[in-house]
Image (tube, grey):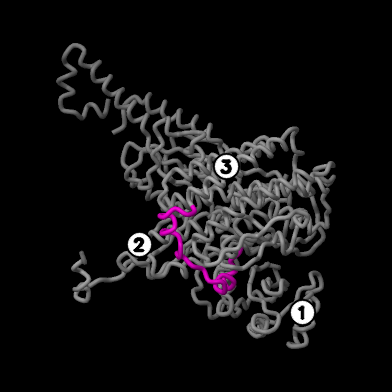
Amino acid sequence: MQENEMLQLLKGRFGQITQEEATKAAVVPKALLLDVADFLKNQELAFDDLHCITAIDRVERIELVYIFYSIEKRHTLTIKVYLAPDDLKIESLAGLWRSADWFEREIYDLFGVYFLNHPDLRRILNPYDWDAHPLRKDFSDPDFIKKPQY
Amino acid sequence: MELMITENNNSIHSEEFYVNMGPQHPSTHGVLYLELKLDGEVVVDCIVHIGYLHRSMEKIAENRTYTQFIPFTDRLDYLASMNNNLGYVLAVEKLLNLEVTERAKYIRVIIAELNRIASHLVAVGTFAQDLGAFATPLFYCFREREKIVELFDELCGNRLTYDYMRIGGVQFDLPQGIDEKIRQVIKYLRSRINDYESLLTYNTIFLIRSKDIGILPKDLALNYSVTGPNLRASGVKYDLRKDEPYLVYDKFQFDIPVGENGDAWDRYRVRMEEMRQSLRIIEQAIAGMPEGDPTAKVGRIHRPAAGEVYAKTENPRGVLGFYIVSDGSPCPYRLKIRAPSFSNLAVLPNLIKGLRVADVVCILGSLDVVMGEIDR
Amino acid sequence: MALIEKIPASKLIGKFPGGKILLTTSENILKWGRASSLWPMTFGLACCAIEMIAAGASRFDIDRFGAGVFRASPRQCDVMIVAGTICVKMGDCMQRLYAQMPEPKYVMAMGNCAISGGIFYHDTYSVVKGTESLGIPVDVYIPGCPPRPENLFFGLMKLQEKIRKEKNARE
C-alpha cells in the first residue's frame, strides 16, 4: 500500500491526524499515540517491525520520529509526534514492540524525553550518574572542544 | 557413577550470584559488559551494559560538512567499512536527488560484496575460536581476508578504514589489471570456502556446541527488529538486495539462504552460504562492467534543500539506515544512524536463560555484533 | 643496577676482580630476556584491535618477536597495547587494569585515538583525549589510523630497544 493511502486510512479512523508540510509525514497528537500504534500493529496494515525511533531538536519543540516496516506486506510508514520543550513526557511503545525498549532509552539518554510505563528507563550510552542531555542544541560542557571553522 | 550431591540437593544452601563478564574480556568481541546472574553454572538472567565505546558521532555530524563525515562512517562497523560508506553516501544522494554513473554503481557493488565476504570471514573465524578451535580457523580466515585486503590496499591505500565512496561516485577508478586479480581471488576463495565447510560444519564437537543453542523464534526476532543473517537463519526470507534493490542488484542472479531453526549453527551456515552468493555477484558484475566516469562532477560542499530522508542498505550484519535532516546549510542538522547490531544485541537476554556460561560465549559469537556501531 | 643490588651476594661479588662485569652481564641477560618475551594484554577497544589481530595472524606474525602470547588477565602480562578510542565509561576500567598489572610494565599507545583522541578530539563529550590524560604513562606511541601491522612491529622493536638500553633494570 502506498504511503498516502495509509495516511487516508489513518485520517479516516482517527480524526486529528495532520500531515507535515515539508516531508509529508503524518503528525499524530501525543494523546493518540498508543491507539494509533495498536491499530498499526494489530489491524490490516500489519506493521510487525518498529524499525527505528529517533528525535530531532528543533529549538521550539522536540519531534519524535517513528519508522514502521511490515515484513509481511513490504510497506513502510513514518510518523511524527511533536513535544513541547516544557512537557517532555510520552507513552512508551515497549509493550507492543520490544525493539522500542533500547531506542527509547537512547532518546532518554541523549535528549531527556521521559517515557511513561517503560520497563527499565535508564541511560544506555553515557555513564549512569551523568546529568546532561548532550544532543540538545543548548548543550555546553567545559571539556567540549568545538572544531574551528576555517 | 552417580554424584552423591544430587541426592542431598535440598539440604545444600545455595544462592544466586552475579558475575561480571566485563568490558575487557577475550570473547566479547569488543567492549561489552554483561552482568550474568548465575545459579551454579546455569545462567538465570543477564543485564547488558553498553556505551563503553560511545564516541558521540551524531554530535560530531552536526559540525562537519557532508563530505567531511565520510571517514567517520568507516569507524562505525569497522569490519565492513565500504558498506557503511555506501549507506551514508546513498542517503546523501537521495537527499540531493543526484544520479550516479553506471560504472560507479558496478564498482560500488563489487566493492560492497568483497567487503561482505571479508566481514563474514572474520565472523566465522572468531565464532570458531570462541567454540574452542582456538587458532586454526581464525588464522585461515585471516589469511583469506589478507587477499581481499590487499586488493583494497591497491585500490585506495588503506587496509581497514577505506573512505573510498564519495557523494556522486567513488574516489578513484579501478587500477589497470585489477579485474584479473579479482578473478583469481574469487577462484581461490571458492575452493577455500568449501574446505572450511568440510572442516567445521559437520564436525561432531562443533555440532554439539552450536546445534539447538540460542534458538531465536521468528516472532521474537521480528518483534525485536532483528535483521540480517540472524533474521534469515530464523526462517524469514528478507534481504534488502532483493526486496528493495538499490544500485544495480536487480540485474544479477543470486539466492538468499534461509535457515530453519534459528540456532547458532543455522546462523553460521547462512553466513557461509552468503559468502558463496557474494562470489557469484562479483563474477557477474565484473563480466558486465561498463565504461565511463567513476565520479559525477559535483563539488565538495553540498547544500541540500531543507528536508529529511531515510535510506537503508543491507550490511553484512543487517539493515543499516541513515536518517538525515537538513536545513539548507553545508552541515546536517541531525543525523541518526540506525545500526543493525544495536537491535541484534537487545535480543540476547532472551536467548540465554537456562544455558551455561560457555553457551553465552557461543551465542554472542553467532550473533556477530560489532561494538563500534552499537555505541557509535 | 637497581634490581641486581637487591641480591644480598652482589656486594660481595662486586669486590672481587671481574665481579662488576659479571653483575652487569647478568643484568643485560635479564633485560634481553624481558625484551624478547613481552606478553601483551588483549586490550583491543575499536578498529585498531582488528589490525592487532591481523598482526598476530599468520601473514604478519608477532610471535617471531616473542610477543605472540596474548593473555586476557592483566596479572599475567607485561605490556598493555591500548588499541582504540578510550571513552569516559571505559577510562576507570582502564586505570584499574593498569594498576593490576605487575611490575615491570609497559604501555604502548596504538593508533591516533589512543595518543590524543584522534579524529574524535573535536565536538565529542565522551572521549578521553589520549592515554596520558588518564594518568597512565606511555612508553611508545604508534601513530596511524589504523597503523599497519608493520608499524606495530616497528613500535614493538623500539620498545624492545628501550628495554635493553635501560640504565637500571626496573624492579
Residue B225 on the magenta span? yes
Q: Are marks 2 and 3 on the same chain?
A: yes
| Residue at 17% in and 19% down | C13
Q: Are marks 3 and 1 on the same chain?
A: no
Chain letter behind tag 1 = A
Q: Are marks 2 and 1 on the same chain?
A: no
Nearer to the camera, B375 or B11: B11
Q: Quadrant of the C terminus of chain C?
A: top left
Q: In terms of image quadrants, where is residue A74?
A: bottom right
Tell us which disc is closer to us: 2 or 1.
1
On the image, the x and y values in percent for residue A31 come to 65, 85
Q: Check disc 3 and report its element: helix, strand or loop.
A: helix
10 Å neighbourhood of mark 1: few (<14), some, or many (≥20)? some
Q: Which residues are magenta?
A: B201-227
| Residue at 78% in and 58% down | B94
Q: Check disc 2 and report its element: helix, strand or loop.
A: strand
On the image, the x and y values in percent for residue C30 come to 29, 27
* Residue linked to disc 3: B145
10 Å neighbourhood of mark 3: few (<14), some, or many (≥20)? many
Specify whether residue B204 is in view: yes
On the image, the x and y values in percent for residue A59 come to 70, 68
Label annotation for residue B19: 2
Horizontal side of residue B175 vs B367, given as left or right: right
Chain letter behind tag 3 = B
Chain letter behind tag 2 = B
Q: Marks 3 and 1, how far apart in space?
A: 46 Å
* Residue linked to disc 1: A6
| Residue at 44% in and 49% down | B129
Instruction: Answer above or below: position of B8 versus B173.
Output: below
Q: Quadrant of the N terminus of chain C?
A: top left
Identified by mark 3, the residue type is Arg
Instruction: Answer above or below: position of B268 versus A148.
Output: below
